């Protein structure tokens, strides 16, 4: 059994990280980032953003496929995986947008496309809808949301205070991680996604769920997440987006994507009958094919079902 620490250690825990050779550590003003980079340096840049509680490994199957046509940049979000906040972390949606903008300015390149999963899709939309001088270098030309979380969680009046209480309690992350290591909790959470992911993915999720610092980051993101006025961001998009959704996602209801498609005029909706919440992990080839079709059609109109 591996030694357990409060936070992940690259030398110890990074040995099981998919595509370890693609990993880099980049320091910006407020963060020490773990980033994986794939593809030719002269190719258009695609930025991939994972959801709450996941990390860059979530793109392990899709990133190499996209690297045929893109320079693919895959960060761990702040306080997730191996990314550390140097100063106090702001894990709200505006805080995440500011952090990712900081990373993009450090890289010195604007993304041609941002692909976000779950909460990462909301971050992608917020980046694309930004119009401030600070975000000018990071506004993409297209956004793809995979099982995007665009609506407030049902029962949020209860959930948000509960998440905040768990976040501020210093014992909660350690207790959760202990339970994830010593009980079937971790496996049950993966089963709850409805996605048959591979063993490499399961191993990393078990590692993440068993690490208090990562759990603390996920709880902090949930506690600070507010989508009450998110429709205004969807309305400010300067271009149609692409929404990929699994109808059997048990974690983020498909109505999130249907709603966003109506608000972001002209957006394309691609549906899969099965695949669950981690659709991009268990059906990477299919998702890559859909994205390739979208890239060929630069001005998608209406709503398509696949």
Image: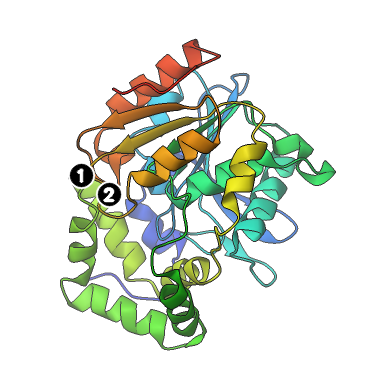
Q: CA distance from mark 2 to mark 1?
A: 5 Å
Q: Quadrant of the C terminus?
A: top left
The residue beneath circle 2 is 201
Determine the image quadrant of residue 245: top left
Determine the image quadrant of residue 184: bottom left
Tell me what residue is drawn at x 55 percent, y 29 percent: 265
Nearest the camera: 65 or 157? 157
Dot 2 alpha-carbon crowd within 10 angstroms: few under 14, some 14 to 19, many 20 or more: many
Instruction: Report whether residue 27 is seen.
Output: no
Element assignment for label 1: loop
Marks 2 and 1 close (CB-CB < 8 Å): yes
In this view, 240 is above or below 195: above
Nearest the camera: 188 or 165? 165
Percent coordinates x, y for residue 181 in the rendering: 24, 74
- Would residue 44 appear left or right of 201 to someone viewing this image? right
The residue beneath circle 1 is 198
Nearest the camera: 269 or 108? 269
Tell me what residue is drawn at x 50 percent, y 79 percent: 164
Nearest the camera: 133 or 241? 241
Determine the image quadrant of residue 206: bottom left
Tell me what residue is drawn at x 29 percent, y 25 percent: 285
Tell me what residue is drawn at x 41 percent, y 61 percent: 53
Dot 1 alpha-carbon crowd within 10 angstroms: few under 14, some 14 to 19, many 20 or more: few
- Would residue 264 appear left or right of 98 to someone viewing this image? left
Element assignment for label 2: helix
Percent coordinates x, y for residue 93 in the rendering: 60, 58
Percent coordinates x, y for residue 76 in the rendering: 50, 52
Q: Quadrant of the N terminus?
A: bottom left
In this view, 63 is above or below 76: above
- Would residue 97 appear left or right of 278 to someone viewing this image? right
Residue furthest out toward the top? 296
């Amino acid at each position: 059994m591996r030694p357990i620490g409060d936070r992940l250690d690259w030398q110890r825990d990074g040995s099981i990280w998919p595509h370890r050779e693609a990993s880099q550590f980049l320091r910006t003003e407020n963060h020490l980032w773990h980033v994986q980079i794939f593809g030719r340096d002269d190719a258009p840049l695609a930025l991939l953003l994972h959801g709450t509680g996941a990390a860059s490994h979530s793109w392990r199957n899709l990133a190499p496929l996209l690297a045929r046509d893109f320079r693919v940049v895959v960060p761990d979000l702040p306080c997730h995986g191996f990314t550390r906040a140097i100063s106090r972390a702001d894990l709200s949606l505006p805080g995440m947008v500011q952090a990712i903008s900081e990373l993009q300015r450090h890289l010195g390149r604007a993304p041609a496309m941002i692909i976000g999963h779950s909460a990462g899709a909301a971050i992608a939309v917020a980046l694309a809808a930004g119009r401030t001088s600070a975000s000018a270098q990071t506004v993409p030309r297209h956004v793809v949301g995979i099982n995007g979380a665009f609506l407030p969680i049902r029962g949020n009046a209860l959930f948000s205070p509960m998440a905040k209480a768990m976040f501020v309690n210093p014992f909660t992350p350690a207790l959760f991680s202990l339970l994830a290591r010593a009980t079937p909790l971790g496996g049950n959470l993966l089963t709850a996604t409805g996605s048959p992911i591979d063993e490499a993915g399961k191993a990393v999720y078990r590692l993440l769920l068993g690490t208090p610092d990562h759990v603390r980051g996920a709880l902090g993101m949930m506690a600070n997440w507010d989508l009450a006025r998110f429709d205004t961001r969807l309305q400010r998009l300067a271009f149609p987006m692409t929404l990929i959704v699994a109808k059997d996602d048990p974690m983020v209801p498909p109505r999130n994507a249907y709603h966003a498609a109506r608000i972001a005029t002209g957006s394309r909706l691609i549906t899969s009958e099965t695949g669950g919440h981690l659709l991009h992990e268990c059906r990477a080839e299919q998702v890559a094919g859909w994205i390739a079709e979208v890239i060929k059609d630069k001005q998608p109109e209406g709503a398509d079902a696949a």
